[in-house]
Amino acid sequence: MRNKFTTLSSTAVPLPIENIDTDQIIPARFLKATTREGFGANLFRDWRYDAEGNPKADFVLNSPRYGGEILVAGKNFGCGSSREHAAWAIAGAGFRAVVSSFFADIFRNNALNNGLLPVKVSEAMLAEIFAAVERDPATQLRIDLPAQTIEIAGTSSKESFEITAYKKQCLMNGYDDVDYLVSIRDEIAAFEQARAAAKE
């Protein structure tokens, strides 16, 4: 079971770069591991650190100005290869949601399968969020999964976002796919019994 996701109010880390691909999120040389642990330390590795492993002061994840559980990224986030490790790295770095105006489909599905919420907003709303966070890093974003809304706290800026009913239920209950099947085992058993009886 994962942590349940209902509402999230948090400051955000702004990364206003478009077309961020999965190799930039987690470089291929770090994909040898088969479990999810440890990937967060190498999130955006080549952007975060120089060749000697020293943090680059001008990269946002190294800035003391920004922090929080929400990553705000430019359009077309998660494009490129289908590696699930990209979602592992983002979640492993402490993010619970990613906000963008467009997500690559495979990344979006991988994120949802790993308890990370991708929130797709309009380009206008994304620009508002970037402006608000960059103006004041203490700005809070509020994501309400049951209502499927995101807002800039203390303002009138608010939008709805889409999510499939199944993945919404899984996130709200902290389920992965197996947990979900276990949660409806009585219904599955009843269906199988009814089906067997109908064949008699």
Image (cartoon, helix red, strand yellow):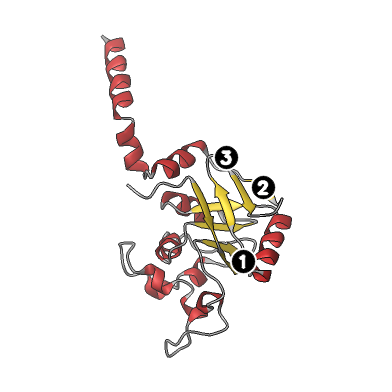
Q: CA distance from mark 2 to mark 1?
A: 23 Å
Residue picked out by circle 2: 159
Mark 3 or mark 2, which has the lower sequence index? 3
Mark in the foreground, 3 or 1: 3
Q: Nearer the viewer, mark 2 or mark 1?
A: 2
Q: Earlier in the sequence, mark 3 or mark 1?
A: 1
Q: Residue 79 placed where, x, y %?
A: 56, 62
Side of 189 relative to 104 (left or right): left
Q: In this picture, is 184 found above or below 75? A: above
How far apart are the alpha carbons under marks 3 and 1? 29 Å
Q: Report which residue position mark 3 lands on.
A: 147
Q: Which residue is mark 1?
A: 19
Name the image quarter holding residue 130: bottom right
Position of residue 173 measured from the top left corner of the image (x, y, whole percent)? 40, 41
Give the mark nearest the N terminus, 2 or 1: 1
Query: Of the residues shown, which amino acid type is indicated by label 3?
Result: Ala
Q: Circle 3: is it few (<14), some (14-19), or many (20+) Cα within 10 Å?
A: few
State the image coordinates of residue 196 (x, y, percent, origin top left): 27, 16
